Image (cartoon, helix red, strand yellow):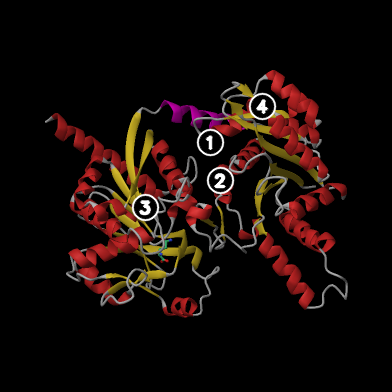
Amino acid sequence: MVNYIIVTGGVISGLGKGITTASIGKILQLHGYKVTAMKIDPYINCDAGTLRPTEHGEVWVTEDGGEIDQDLGHYERFLDINIPKHHNITTGQVYGIVIDKERKGKYLGKTVQPIPHVTDEIKERIRRPSTEGKYDFILVEIGGTVGDYENVLFLEAVRQMKREGNHLIDVHVTYVPVLETLGEAKTKPTQHSVKLLREMGIQPDFIITRSEKPLDEPRRDKIALFCNVDEEDVISDSNIDNVYAVPLMFEEQYLSKKILKKLHLRKDHNDLATWKTYIENIRSYEKKLNIGIVGKYFDIGSFKLSDSYISVIEAVKHAAWNNGFTPYIEWIDSKQYERDPNTITNLNELDGIIVPGGFGLSGIEGKISTIQHVREHNIPYLGLCLGMQLAVVEYARNICGLSDANSKEVNKETQHSVIDVIPEQATIIRESRYGATMRLGSYPAILQPGSQVQQLYGKTKVYERHRHRYEVNPEYIELLEQKGLVFSGKSPDRVLMEFMELPNHPFFIATQAHPEFKSRPMKPSPVFDGFVKAAWKKQQQDQKIMVK
Ligand code: GLN
């Protein structure tokens, strides 16, 4: 029988429920259980594909081409599994199905209502992975906070599932603030949050309290008493230096043992040691790497930039840790180089530069100047999707002499659209069919034997995830290659350019794909791994020059 762990949130959003869910999954997985995870996003959008990064953070791309909330990225990274797109449920998807069924007369003349018809659909979606027979645990994170209008029907569906006899426990994640003036942790918001949850008919089995400092005994007792849980089921989740250490923090409080006990399951084995050593090693690395990410999405109020590029950051960390380095990331707004071109020499201070994926027009020229600078000054460069497209534009302009070369996305009028849409995408754009219509998900690339990327991957056929509409324009490939740019990875039919590199540069590799989506702790992406090694080499050489 499959077991469900429902993760709900209270008090405030942004508590890191995704990390909590992934960490609970991890400790169960390390005890030998087969685990997967799902995310419920109560918004009406059918997926995250049309959401602006400053609104939503990064859009995560699954192997099967889903465009999903970044929490799925946490699950995949922590659990080291691929999660399919149907593990993301949104209000838009659920209502879409219900309305479609109604139009087809499937409800046989009944009045179609939120309860039971919408909740039935939600339950069907939550239970779907269990029909695959592969999992002991399905973790289900419900987005938003209890008390929101949007997630009422999802919570109701969970209540019904428990009533129907599913093996299900609820983990409620709340926030325990410390008021500076009082210097005391306050549990009242947690009490109110649990009260709201119980009004919905759900009694939490565990309460996980996010806070700056570990929860003390009196607060734990108070939460237990007012929220009707045992003291030992109040789990402290205080700020920590590394998110991958959260599973260890939970295990110090015996969370997996307590969960298994409630579900009458036995703990068979324990593989925590490798994970523990991994974290201890990370904490001991003394060599520092300075990596610059030149992007945009920088200037919206209090928006947290790292959310837009979270997978890129994690991929840098995984690769750096695997080589014994601690990475430091510098955020660089490419528009700065448009305003003040002289500041571009600041890039020389960094060990390596990444231009990540992106959409739209702003900051493009600053990114192109960045790429020219790193190309000309032998600074290791990794270009991801847009970062490859602009590397091609820069090369076409400055090496091939096509001074107005550009991407059609940026300039519709350019005479030399070295980056353009494939014909089927042109139709999609004309008809404004923007949802789920990019080139999405995993596609193969055939790597040129002996090329740098082929050596990094150690094989000639690789699969990476994609999310783009634009491509290298086939009309310019011959010219670019004649002038020394190597397209070292192509689609199997050789029509689409998947990887490029510059053989005379210490490390200049770019890809139309997003290898960051497949990077995992202890299993870094090969291109990121090569990039951090090259960055370290540059740092060593710079030091030699300084010593001289
Ligand atoms: N905007 C570009 C395209 O659509 C690049 C997308 C990306 O970087 N993911 O092709």
Label 4 or label 2, whichever comes before in sequence order: 2
**On the rendered structure, is 20 left or right of 58?**
right
On the question of residue 215 being in view, the answer is yes
Tell me the CA gap for discs 2 and 1: 10 Å
Q: Is residue 150 above or below residue 440?
A: above
Q: Which residue type carries mark 4?
A: Lys
Specify the segment rendered in magenta: 271-284
**Residue at x-position 18% and y-position 68%:** 400
Bin the neighbour count of mark 2 within 10 Å (Cα to Cα): few under 14, some 14-19, many 20 and up.
many
| Label 2: element kind | helix
Q: Quadrant of residue 62?
A: bottom right
Q: Is residue 508 above or below residue 322?
A: below
**Residue at x-position 25% and y-position 73%:** 478
Q: Is residue 220 above or below residue 111?
A: above
Tell me the CA gap for discs 3 and 1: 24 Å
Q: Which residue type carries mark 1?
A: Val
Furthest-top residue in view? Answer: 217
Furthest-left residue in view? Answer: 548
**Foreground of the two, 514 or 35:** 514
Circle 1 is placed at which residue position? 243
**On the rendered structure, is 117 left or right of 454?**
right
Furthest-front residue in view? Answer: 181
Mark carried by residue 186: 4
> Where does the image place residue 218, in percent across and percent down from the top left?
71, 19
**Foreground of the two, 147 or 445:** 147
Q: Nearer the viewer, mark 2 or mark 3?
A: 3
Tell me the CA gap for discs 4 and 2: 29 Å
Mark carried by residue 56: none
Circle 2 is placed at which residue position? 74
Q: Nearer the viewer, mark 3 or mark 1?
A: 3
